[in-house]
């Protein structure tokens, strides 16, 4: 009795808080029980991949008596699990009565003590699942079986069949108990003496009659489920089929390897391996500690040795048959929960070893000495007392407060439900996306229902609506329209831990819900919690109707031979709708829908970059994301079957974006940031989707004080116009002819009446000016200063070039407004100081070893070159010097390439602005001579032989090469064969 009370105490201590929250399957069972209380009766529930409802009826009874809460469900299981302890004692005594009453009772006490102190059994005794009900009903079944066999009476056998049927109702793994019983009765035919004088049929009935009684009783009691499974076979095999070693999702292409892992891992759980699932176990803890494991395997060996005796054979067959379904379902190895039917026999085998040790010591002890018994009693007390202590420590101190335990029991769902309850918004709704997992249909009562979240939400009174969205693309708008009817506030939940099908971003990797909600409302706030985020939107109307854009434009653009941009559409998200007009306000959002087709093999999971580009090529706004298909896979896993793949964007337009015409462009790049060429053009990396007009809003949405500016000035140019600041980094020196870009923020402080221009200059201390920018309207001819309104803030990027003839030294960078006639207006504003790094210039032709006299585009002439060596070894740096003459002042900073070719294949190359960027062609003066030293690294695996050395000049922005002509003006193409070089043992003529 003391052991039973202690067992019950351990299984109910702090049960209302440990384990935390509610396991996913626990909550599903509780939901079934609630539905039964509401009158929705059924034999079978499709929740958690399908299970019978017998146990849920028991939970419903408990709920009706004590209330609907996790504690009540767990208390029921804890009570039955506690009863398993004395039942195990009774079964052990019954099995081994032939050893004598005293020895049988000792064996029973040892088995019960082992089970009572087991972490394995304690853990599952405190979880409201069917797992720990299996040994409870199994021990009852076996106990009455042995009573029937010993007494020869029928009623214990009928009771055994009844308990067997209840076990079959509880858990699919119990279906192997009839197999075990059948094998045991076959064993009895050969091992148990029978009256051979009787007719053979009577002998068969004598040996198998009890099994028939048990079987018929079980069939009668289980008949409703047999009838159900006859009409719905999938219900019988569905859940098991998903975990079987033959399932490709389980075996990953190696079924026999998976079966072997299941065998080794699950057998090894009894002393060697550990279940790593936080719900099942403390990581690293085997079912048995080393001493208990040794006793268990000793007991198993003893039972195999005495297999000719039915009690021992019964234990061996029980363990061997009931571990078989665990071995063949290796989706998790080991799986402590599925082994729970083995718990009683495991500790009976431990007890057998201990009892045998005690018997052997008594026989070896001289006379009637009590010393062996006393020592063994002390050892047993220390063994099970120590086990009890470590079990309590590991469970309540180490396992219970761990984060992994919190997540395994959906602690995040409980906390989210509490937040929903506190929110209490009648016009609000919380929305949770549910991964479609490649399916096209969903039942929201079980397939798209986060059971713990929904359960705690109901427990809290459901003050604010909670809804789920099955993320099948065609159905999403309709579902969202239904959900938000009569609502103005939508809280989009992004779960980051917990049940996989509800996790973000897996459930909605393409952000479809954000696309719809942000197009129909305003994102008010984002709240971050440890395991989830909540994005709150305020809708523009309480009757919002969602729909995907219908009219698509054909593009047919090839990206690197891998993907094709087949079609798309774009426009502005205006007043809660996707407006197809290519018009958007500053501070608004542009929506884009693209359709991608698969062209060939895609080896990388590509990312897409959507850009808003101004007339000068500046990227104003940009949105990048990984491309996901409808099946949540990256592009490397796309198949032709799922094409076309929809790709959604909501591009925020900065509130400081000036009105005007812009281009929407799309590009693709690899994880290594390599852009895919577009349309077979090697230097074009983006495709234009079309123009987008940005217009000024009715009132400014940007407050000057809220705008982040790298270098704030707040300097007045005129009483109506000020420079808020800029982003130009002035601490690094500039080279003559170097180009740069500056982003300026214009702050309208009054109401400008005149159409003004502006200019940007360099000024030295003596007042001499050098132009950086040509005089122009600040925001273009389409948006003159006379159209600006008080309070507006506009940002625009401007390209400038340091004059190539500017002497080295320090200068002021000055902005000045002027009238259309060029007369200065207002006060100039100094952006800062800039350092021009002067360099020596040469206007006398250098001595050249190998002359060429070849012109490139009429802007620069190659006088010749020098080679540092006649040949190189693989892995060395091939160095050369190119000698150039500037024929004109250049407005483009050109790139020079040097390619090493084997046939038509480039094996090594060097592309750079001359002087590794320090000698831009825009800084060259007519008649100036420039020497450019270039080093080309040769690959270490380069084969010996002759290689061509080719050079050319191109505009890096467009990829366009300058045409090459000889001294007579004859065209040579777009590159020049400079020389041949030798690698390894090759020979080369190095004469020019």
Image (cartoon, rainbow, N blue to C red):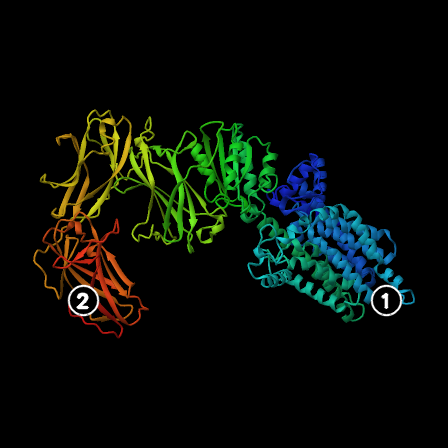
Q: What SS does tag 2 mark?
A: strand
Q: Locate the C terminus by quadrant.
A: bottom left
Tell whether 10 sits left or right of 567: right
Q: Is residue 928 above or below residue 32?
A: below
Q: Position of residue 328 (x, y in %)?
A: 64, 59
Q: Position of residue 365 (x, y in %)?
A: 77, 70
Tell whether 249 sits left or right of 544: right
- Quadrant in the rendering for residue 320: bottom right
Q: Position of residue 674 (x, y in %)?
A: 35, 53
Residue placed furthest toward the bottom: 985
Tell whether 352 sits left or right of 756: right
Q: Can residue 712 be seen in this snapshot?
A: no
Q: Nearer the viewer, residue 321 or 197?
A: 197
- Ranked by sequence position, the earlier of labels 2 and 1 is 1
Report the disc number at residue 867. 2
Q: Nearer the viewer, residue 55 or 891?
A: 891
Image label count: 2
Tell whether 900 sits left or right of 202: left
Residue placed furthest toward the left: 844
- Spatial CA distance of label 2 from label 1 is 103 Å
Q: Residue at x 27, y 35 (%)?
A: 795
Q: What SS does tag 1 mark?
A: loop
Q: Residue at x 43, y 48 (%)?
A: 597
From the viewer's perspective, is the residue at label 2 or at label 1 nearer?
2
Q: Nearer the viewer, residue 155 or 665?
A: 665
- Quadrant in the rendering for residue 18: top right
Q: Residues within 10 Å of mark 2 (few under 14, many from 20)?
A: some
Q: Residues within 10 Å of mark 1 (few under 14, many from 20)?
A: few
Q: Is residue 665 above or below residue 308?
A: above
* Residue to which mark 1 is pinned: 193
């Amino acid at each position: 009795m003391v052991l039973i009370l202690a067992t019950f105490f351990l299984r109910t201590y702090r049960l209302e808080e440990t384990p935390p929250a509610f396991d996913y399957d626990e909550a599903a069972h509780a939901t079934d029980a609630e539905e039964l209380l509401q009158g929705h009766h059924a034999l079978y529930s499709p929740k958690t991949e399908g299970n019978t409802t017998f146990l849920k009826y028991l939970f419903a009874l408990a709920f009706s008596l004590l209330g609907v809460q996790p504690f009540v469900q767990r208390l029921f299981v804890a009570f039955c699990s506690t009863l398993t302890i004395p039942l195990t004692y009774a079964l052990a005594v019954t099995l081994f009565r032939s050893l004598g009453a005293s020895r049988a009772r000792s064996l029973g006490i040892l088995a019960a003590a082992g089970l009572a102190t087991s972490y394995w059994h304690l853990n599952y005794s405190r979880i409201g699942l069917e797992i720990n009900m299996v040994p409870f009903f199994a021990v009852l079944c076996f106990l009455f079986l042995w009573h029937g066999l010993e007494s020869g009476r029928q009623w214990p056998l009928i009771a055994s069949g009844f308990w067997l049927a209840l076990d079959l109702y509880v858990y699919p793994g119990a279906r192997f108990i009839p197999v075990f019983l059948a094998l045991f009765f076959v064993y009895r035919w050969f091992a148990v003496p029978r009256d051979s004088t009787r007719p053979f049929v009577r002998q068969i009935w004598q040996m198998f009659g009890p099994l028939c009684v048990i079987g018929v009783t079980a069939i009668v009691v289980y008949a409703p489920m047999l009838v159900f499974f006859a009409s719905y076979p999938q219900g019988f095999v569905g859940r098991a089929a998903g975990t079987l070693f033959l399932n490709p999702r389980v075996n990953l292409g190696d079924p026999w390897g998976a079966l072997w892992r299941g065998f080794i891992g699950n057998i090894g759980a009894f002393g060697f391996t550990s279940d790593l699932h936080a719900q099942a176990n403390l990581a690293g803890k085997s079912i048995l500690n080393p001493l208990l494991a040794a006793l268990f395997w000793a007991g198993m060996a003893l039972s195999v040795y005495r297999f000719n005796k039915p009690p021992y054979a019964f234990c061996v067959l029980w363990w061997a048959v009931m571990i078989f379904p665990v071995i063949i379902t290796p989706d998790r190895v080991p799986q402590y929960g599925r082994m729970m039917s083995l718990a009683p026999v495991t500790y009976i085998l431990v007890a057998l070893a201990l009892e045998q040790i005690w018997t052997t010591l008594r026989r070896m002890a001289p006379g009637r000495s009590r010393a062996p018994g006393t020592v063994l009693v002390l050892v047993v007390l220390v063994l099970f007392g120590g086990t009890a202590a470590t079990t309590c420590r590991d469970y309540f101190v180490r396992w219970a407060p761990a984060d992994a335990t919190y997540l395994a029991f959906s602690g995040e769902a409980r906390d989210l439900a509490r937040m929903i309850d506190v929110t209490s918004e009648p016009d609000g709704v919380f929305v949770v996306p549910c991964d479609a997992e490649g399916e096209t249909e969903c039942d929201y009562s079980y397939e798209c229902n986060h059971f713990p979240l929904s359960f705690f939400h109901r427990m809290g009174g459901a003050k604010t609506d909670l809804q789920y969205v099955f993320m099948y693309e065609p159905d999403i708008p309709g579902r969202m329209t239904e959900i938000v009817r009569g609502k103005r506030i939508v809280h989009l939940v992004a779960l980051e831990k917990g049940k996989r099908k509800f996790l973000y971003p897996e459930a909605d990797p393409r952000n479809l819900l954000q696309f719809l909600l942000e197009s129909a409302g305003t994102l008010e706030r984002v709240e971050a919690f440890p395991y989830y985020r909540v994005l709150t939107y305020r809708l523009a109307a309480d009757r919002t109707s969602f729909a995907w854009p219908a009219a698509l434009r054909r593009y047919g653009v090839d990206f690197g031979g891998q993907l094709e941009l087949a079609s798309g559409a774009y426009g502005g998200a205006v007043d809660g709708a996707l407006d197809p007009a290519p018009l958007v306000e500053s501070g608004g959002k542009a929506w884009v829908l693209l359709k991608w087709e698969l062209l060939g093999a895609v080896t990388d999971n590509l990312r897409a970059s959507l850009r808003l580009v101004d007339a000068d090529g500046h990227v104003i706004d940009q949105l990048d994301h990984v491309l996901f298909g409808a099946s949540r896979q990256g592009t490397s896993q796309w198949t032709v079957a799922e094409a076309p793949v929809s790709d959604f964007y909501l591009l925020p337009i900065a509130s400081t974006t000036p009105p005007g015409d812009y281009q929407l462009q799309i590009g693709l790049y690899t994880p290594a940031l390599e852009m895919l060429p577009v349309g077979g053009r090697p230097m074009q990396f983006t495709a234009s989707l079309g123009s987008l007009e940005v217009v000024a809003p009715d009132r400014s949405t940007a407050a000057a004080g809220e705008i982040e500016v790298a270098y704030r000035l707040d300097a007045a140019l005129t009483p109506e116009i000020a420079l808020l600041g800029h982003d130009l980094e002035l601490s690094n020196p500039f080279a003559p002819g170097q180009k740069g870009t500056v982003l300026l923020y214009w702050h309208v402080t009054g109401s400008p009446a005149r159409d003004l221009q502006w200019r940007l200059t360099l000024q030295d201390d003596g007042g001499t000016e050098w132009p950086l920018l040509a005089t122009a309207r600040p925001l273009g001819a389409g948006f003159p200063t006379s159209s600006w309104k008080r309070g507006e803030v506009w940002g625009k990027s401007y390209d400038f070039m340091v004059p190539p003839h500017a002497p080295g030294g320090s200068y002021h960078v000055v902005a000045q407004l002027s009238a259309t006639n060029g007369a200065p207006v207002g006060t100039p504003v100094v952006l800062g100081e800039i350092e021009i790094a002067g360099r020596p210039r040469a206007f006398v032709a250098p001595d050249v070893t190998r002359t060429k006299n070849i012109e490139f585009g009429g802007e620069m002439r190659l006088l010749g070159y020098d080679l540092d060596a006649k040949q190189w070894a693989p892995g060395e740096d091939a160095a050369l010097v190119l000698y150039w003459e500037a024929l004109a002042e250049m407005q483009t900073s050109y790139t020079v390439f040097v390619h090493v070719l084997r046939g038509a294949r480039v094996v090594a190359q060097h592309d750079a602005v001359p002087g590794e960027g320090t000698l831009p062609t825009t800084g060259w003066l007519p008649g100036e001579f420039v020497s450019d030293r270039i080093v080309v690294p040769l690959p270490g695996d380069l084969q010996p032989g002759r290689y061509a050395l080719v050079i050319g000049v191109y505009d890096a922005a467009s990829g366009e090469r300058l045409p090459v002509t000889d001294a007579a003006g004859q065209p040579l193409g777009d590159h020049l064969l400079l020389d041949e070089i030798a690698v390894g043992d090759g020979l080369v003529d190095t004469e020019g």
